Image (tube, grey):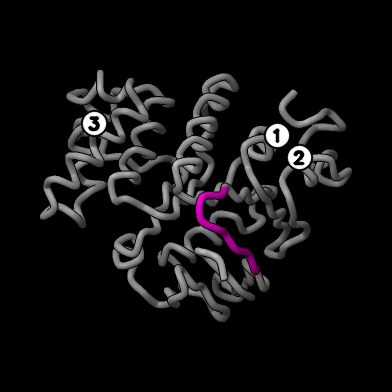
Amino acid sequence: MGLLDVSDLRVSYGSIEALKGISLHVEPGEIVAVLGSNGAGKTTTLKTISGLLRPRSGSITFDGSSIVGRAAHDIVALGLSQIPEGRRLFHVLSVDENLSMGGYLMRARRNVLRERRAHVYETFPLLAERRRQLAGTLSGGEQQMLAIGRALMSEPRLLMLDEPSLGLSPLLSKRLLRIVRRIADQGTAVLLVEQNARQALAISDRAYVIETGSILLSGQASLLAQDERVQKAYLGGYQAVGS
């Protein structure tokens, strides 16, 4: 049993079935990428795991316990955090204040919060330089760093990222995903939904390809990167990943 186990997950929006029996798992310390075209069901999968949507059927188990039906804040307290597409920062609050909001559930543990904040600033030194700056005045890349840092404040065991490189330059996107790889290497598992399939596969251990609410392909990221179907659909031909 993995850290996260999702089995036969089905989710509907009214009469439209968005997920048609999704099954996946994430082990401690690994990065698992979820690839697919727009509308394939990637974000719906993350939202259902994090408790923002309720499945019609199927199971979601985190660290051996079912989390289906649990409130989103309870799921965060268990050690599972999601960074949504678009970052959703508190733009009128400073960098430091945004981090404090990320650690709200452990606000009584002041020593832990200080340690987590120091860890975030060590991971993202640029944020330390801008700790008093309003989040809304940061660049896109800095805002994404802050979104990740805010999620890290809750000391997650599994971090779910939804399109972290959206709107960023290729160079900044690559830099950010390398930091995500480092976070995983330090022990935090990552479930990554990412539009840049080439870079996502380059840093991931395993990957799933979702099409119209179903798993089309799954396996080791390095092997999927060489799959002709993946190359044609997501990698723009037959170039090697990382090139």
**Does residue 29 show up magenta in the picture?**
yes
First-in-chain label (3 vs 2): 3
Q: Which label's residue is closer to the chain start, 1 or 2?
A: 1
- The residue located at (55%, 61%) in the rendering is 45
In the rendered image, which residue does mark 1 sit on?
198
Horizontally, residue 131 falls left or right of residue 186, namely left
Disc 1/disc 2 C-alpha distance (Å): 8 Å
The vertical placement of 139 against 100, above or below, is above
Q: Which mark is residue 177?
A: none
Which mark lies nearer to you, 1 or 2? 1
Badge 3 or badge 1: first in the primary sequence? 3
Horizontal and vertical percent for residue 210?
Answer: 70, 57
**Quadrant of the image for the N terminus?**
bottom right
Residue 234, numbered label: 2
Q: Is residue 30 left or right of residue 236?
A: left
Residue linked to disc 3? 95
Residue occupying the point 42% across, 26% down: 140
Of 12 and 64, the residue lying toward us: 64
Bounds of the magenta segment: 23-30
47, 188: nearer the viewer: 188
